[in-house]
Image (cartoon, rainbow, N blue to C red):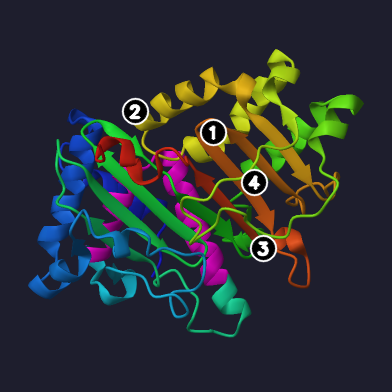
Amino acid sequence: MRIDHTVRLLVLLSAVPSVWAQSSTAKIVTAANTFLSALDAGQRQAVQYAFDDERQRVKWSNFPTGMTPRGGINLKSMTAAQRTAAMAVVAAALSPKGYEKVLQIMEADETLKGNERGNPMFGKDLYYISFLGAPSLKDPWMIQFGGHHLAVNITIAGEQGVLTPTLTGAQPSLFTSNGKTVRPLAGESDKAMALLHALDEEQKKKAILGFRLADLVLGPGKDGRTIQPEGLKGVEMTDKQRAMMLDVMSEWAGIVHEKAAAARMAELKAELNDTWFAWSGPVTVEPGKNIAAYYRIQGPHVVIEYAPQRMGGDASLHVHTMYRDPTNDYGKKFWTK
């Protein structure tokens, strides 16, 4: 299966009629209902869960789907028209930048499959989609899309859109496609390194931790856990440095559709003084490559982690990242009392 720019254009223009005339939520609902109508009865039953299905809500992972099964149906089991409709849902729920990132992560897994001599555990057709609750303009419901190195969880409640918890990763995190170098997590790497280098020596002493972190602290299966903020606090940064930190956060907060992203970025900006930046690992990087260091950004309503994997070889080529709002993961503020 190949998903390129032509298909992305068809997704937006043909699978979602009158997309530009609709509100953000209406676009998503239209895309979701179009997808459901393209499925047979058995597929629809497999895709749809009750909104209060707690078991399915947390059924996401970084591992390949053969190791950790997901709910819903995968792209491999769909017809071409159904795949186009499924990806239209993802495109409607995300920003163009976010959708491109998802496609690049999937392409990285296809590259990994080739590198692993066609290992059937990998590949861009092994990504699953599921809905919790019925697509609605008013009532809360949820879209899940993911597979190896990807778990997008989007809770929609009216015009509110909550992307947390969402996991993005890549292996390889640098590869060539159609003669072009692709780095799905380039911004996450480059912007963080730029922020570190923008700190003075005293700030770096606070930001750089005295121990190494090997993986995500709040990854899959860690819902409800808390960690103590560490590193350099935003109030100790200059205005320029705080703006750079917000720009790093935009690599996660900015991948949801534009209206939800704008609201989220405003929230994060208002809390920059109380947001911490911590770094663990190498403080240099080879030009054009990703960092091999762990870092964390933590504020009152956000925890972001970037964690290269040190399981042999080049750690910069295998990256996990996590984006959470411990106070509102799964949009719980909108559906719990």
Residue designated by label 2 = 259
Q: Distance between the residues labelled 4 and 1?
A: 13 Å
Magenta stretch: includes residue 71: no
| 139 up-or-down from 61: above or below | above
Mark 4 in CB contact with mark 1 (< 8 angstroms): no
First reached walking from the N terminus: tag 4 or tag 1: 4
Answer few, some or many: residues within 10 Å of disc 2's Cα (few below 14, many 20 plus, some between 14 and 19). some
- Residue 318 seen in render: yes
How many other residues sit within 10 Å of disc 3, few (<14), some (14-19) or many (≥20)?
A: many
Q: Would you name the residue on which mark 1 appears? A: 250
Which residue: 55% across, 21% down? 271
Q: Say the numbered circle drawn on residue 186.
A: 4
Q: Residue furthest top?
A: 239
The spot of residue 147 in percent (x, y) is: 43, 66
Tell me whether circle 3 and circle 1 mark residues in contact (CB < 8 Å).
no
Q: Which of 14 and 83 is in front in this view?
A: 83
Determine which residue is flagged by label 3.
318
Label 3 or label 2, whichever comes before in sequence order: 2
Frontmost residue, 186 versus 134 = 134
| Magenta-highlighted residues | 82-111
Q: Which is more foreground, mark 4 or mark 3?
A: 3
Crowding around mark 4 (Cα neighbors within 10 Å: few <14, some 14 to 19, many 20+) is some
Q: How far apart are marks 1 and 2 (CA)?
A: 14 Å
Image coordinates for residue 67, horizontal then vertical, percent: 47, 79
Regarding mark 3 in the picture, which secondary structure is present there?
A: loop
Cβ atoms under marks 2 and 4 closer than 8 Å: no
The amino acid type of the residue labelled 2 equals Lys
Distance of label 3 from label 2 (alpha carbons): 31 Å
- The mark nearer the N terminus, 3 or 1, is 1
Q: Nearer the viewer, mark 2 or mark 4?
A: 2
Residue type at tag 3: His
Q: What element carries label 4?
A: helix
